């Protein structure tokens, strides 16, 4: 008789995860006719199954064909990940890894959420699902996809993207001072009474709502009261006002909306710009709503530690504002919601997006080098608060940069307290606009290359958070230059040194 393997009670899983995994192994035995080697019990390293796993396709510079080639022998969720644009931009409300895992688990049905990957990604995802799922007669492709076993255990909290927790806003306070060109907010949400838990390095998912003033302007242009019945993204029906507030993106137009108005697609045009020109031609409200994109949650790096602030979660939010090509002032949906829309006492729908690859070192004695300009400071405030509250003895070095010291030194008082209490060993700042020539964090790294390399040689972990477009690659180049110069290595040897840091989880990035 075939023995069905079961996880030992000591395995690091919640009861729900253990039950799910045991079911998965039972399914595996019945489908393959053989038990995984190792007898009746199975040792699994971590609940997220990502430890020591590398993602060679996770490089946005590679073409999709090459990425898929690199993942071709991997499980389906990794092939799906390789089909994503690899930007971890969060436009889908996940990062590339977690979006593909949610699809593989059957939790996420929408295959078109990877905006930068566009149609190419969506059609590859569909193909992968079709290859894997052969519906039995009478079963739809979608239900077959849901029924298929995934190798990823479900999330632990009772709250999730699909079942967010309504967290009360305690405060949303400006971090910049007068004279700043920026609006960055310190957002504090109340988790008291919830089962939500997080660790430094995790992100918070926030389901935003659109600006009510913009909703009102759209209703007026459509000559609608808001009570009209329209389809919601989940196939149910809702009122037009509710759909515009909570269900759809009403800032950036889709290709379908341009088509609906018979307009060629153009960059940086707002939905309201199109409506001002074409709303009178519109006869069918359902068609208008169907041409909008469903609203997705946004991710924010958590900037607090539960040890320092039990029952709270803090975020560091840069408010997005710009003008459309027609001069219309545009606001980022979630950053505006968290800074102005949501009032203290009101509740935002949130969930924890756990990060397997961005976390404190296992030992509190390990030195850390953290590079976090602008809102990139967020996870490092959490790291320092956790290390301070836990009494960890490891050395900590923060590189922070922003435009002007007098107006943009985010969390200046707290950073100084971390220094005076000894939690923060080294602080290097780069205020780019306080002098004629720009000074950035990577310039400070290069100036202090000798000590930085010594820290690396002592086993330091190197972290980067913030802008993905330019800063992250400039910092990466500076790191390689330091390793080459201080370690007396060739460019190839320095690249291999840095690659080894990545492989051993000592070089971690949370960039967006
Ligand atoms: C893992 C992760 C962690 C993150 N952590 C943080 C964090 O700690 N703090 C933080 O502030 N953000 C963070 N972000 C970014 C955050 O998720 C949102 O993307 C950001 O707040 C913007 O969302 P929004 O809804 O306000 O803007 P949206 O409504 O999504 O608008 C943004 C879009 O507006 C357009 N746009 C913006 N500026 C211009 C311009 N000048 N001209 C023309 N078009 C423009 C672009 O198309 C851009 O994609 C993180 C993202 C990820 C993936
Ligand atoms: N995905 C999204 O929708 C989204 C939304 C919000 C923010 N973001 C990203 O998050 C980043 C953080 O935004 P933020 O406003 O807090 O800070 P930021 O724009 O990154 O600015 C912080 C500091 O970094 C400097 N900087 C500019 N280019 C740099 C480079 N190549 N290398 C190193 N430093 C550089 C800036 O200098 P100067 O400005 O003087 O050049 C400034 O002093 C943004 O750049 C943006 O890309 C993304």
Image (cartoon, grey):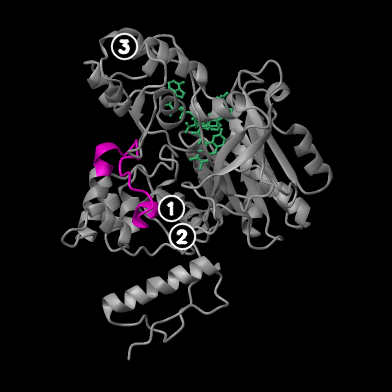
Alpha carbon distance from label 3 to label 2 = 44 Å
- Residue 412 lies, in percent from the top left, at 75, 32
- Quarter holding the N terminus? bottom left
226 lies above or below 468: above
Identify the residue at image location x=34%, y=73%.
27
Identify the residue at image location x=45%, y=80%.
6
Q: Which residues are magenta?
A: 101-122
Query: On the rendered structure, is 426 left or right of 162?
Result: right
Query: On the rendered structure, is 307 left or right of 329?
Result: right
Q: Give the secondary structure at mark 1.
A: helix
| Nearest-to-viewer mark from 3 and 1 | 3
Marks 1 and 2: in contact by CB < 8 Å?
Answer: no
Identify the residue at image location x=69%, y=38%.
428
Q: Give the secondary structure at mark 2.
A: loop
| Nearest-to-viewer mark from 2 and 1 | 2
- Residue 98 lies, in percent from the top left, at 43, 51
Magenta span has 124? no
- Please tell me which of labels 3 and 1 falls first in the chain: 3
Q: Which residue is mark 2?
A: 154
**Image mark for residue 279:** 3
Q: Which residue is mark 1?
A: 492
- Please tell me which of labels 2 and 1 falls first in the chain: 2
């Amino acid at each position: 008789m075939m023995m069905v393997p079961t996880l030992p009670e000591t395995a690091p899983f919640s009861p729900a995860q253990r039950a799910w995994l045991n079911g998965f192994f039972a399914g595996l035995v019945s489908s393959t006719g053989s038990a995984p080697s190792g007898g009746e019990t199975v040792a699994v390293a971590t609940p997220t199954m990502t430890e020591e796993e590398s993602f060679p396709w996770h490089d946005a510079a590679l073409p999709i064909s090459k990425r898929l080639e690199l993942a071709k022998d991997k499980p389906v969720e990794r092939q799906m990940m390789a089909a994503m644009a690899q930007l971890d931009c969060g436009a889908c409300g996940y990062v590339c890894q977690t979006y593909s895992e949610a699809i593989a688990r059957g939790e996420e049905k929408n295959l078109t959420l990877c905006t930068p990957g566009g149609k190419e990604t969506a059609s590859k995802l569909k193909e992968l699902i079709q290859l894997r799922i052969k519906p039995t007669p009478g079963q739809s492709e979608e239900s077959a996809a849901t029924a298929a076993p995934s190798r990823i255990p479900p999330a632990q909290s009772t709250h999730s993207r699909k079942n967010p927790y309504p967290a009360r806003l305690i405060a949303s306070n400006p971090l910049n001072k007068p004279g700043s060109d920026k609006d960055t907010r310190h957002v504090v949400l109340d988790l008291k009474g919830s089962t939500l838990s997080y660790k430094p390095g995790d992100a918070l998912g926030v389901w935003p709502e659109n600006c009510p003033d913009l909703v009102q302007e759209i209703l007026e242009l459509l000559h609608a009261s808001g009570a009209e019945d329209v389809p919601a993204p989940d196939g149910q029906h809702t009122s037009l006002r509710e759909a515009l507030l909570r269900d759809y993106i009403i800032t950036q137009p889709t290709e379908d909306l341009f088509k609906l108005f018979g307009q060629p697609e153009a960059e940086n045009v707002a939905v309201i710009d199109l409506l001002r020109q074409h709303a009178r031609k519109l006869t069918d409200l359902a068609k208008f709503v169907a041409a909008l994109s469903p609203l997705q949650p946004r991710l924010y790096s958590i900037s607090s530690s539960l040890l320092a602030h039990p029952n709270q979660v803090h975020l560091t939010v840069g408010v997005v504002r710009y003008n459309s090509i027609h001069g219309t002032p545009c606001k980022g949906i979630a950053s505006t919601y968290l800074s102005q829309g949501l009032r203290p006492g009101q509740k935002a729908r949130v969930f924890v997006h756990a990060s397997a690859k961005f976390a404190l070192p296992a030992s509190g004695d390990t030195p850390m080098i953290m590079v976090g300009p602008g809102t990139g400071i967020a996870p490092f405030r959490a790291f320092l608060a956790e290390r301070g509250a836990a009494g960890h003895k490891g050395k900590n070095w923060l590189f922070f940069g922003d435009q002007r010291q007098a107006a943009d030194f985010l969390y200046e008082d707290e950073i100084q307290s971390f220094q005076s209490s000894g939690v923060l060993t080294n602080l290097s700042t780069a205020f780019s606009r306080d002098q004629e020539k720009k000074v950035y964090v990577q310039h400070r790294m290069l100036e202090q290359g000798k000590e930085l390399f010594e820290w690396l040689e002592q086993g330091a972990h190197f972290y980067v958070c913030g802008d993905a477009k330019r800063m992250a690659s400039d910092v990466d180049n500076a790191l390689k230059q330091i390793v080459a110069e201080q370690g007396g290595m060739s460019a190839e040897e320095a690249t291999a040194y840095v690659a080894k840091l990545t492989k051993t989880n000592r070089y971690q990035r949370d960039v967006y």
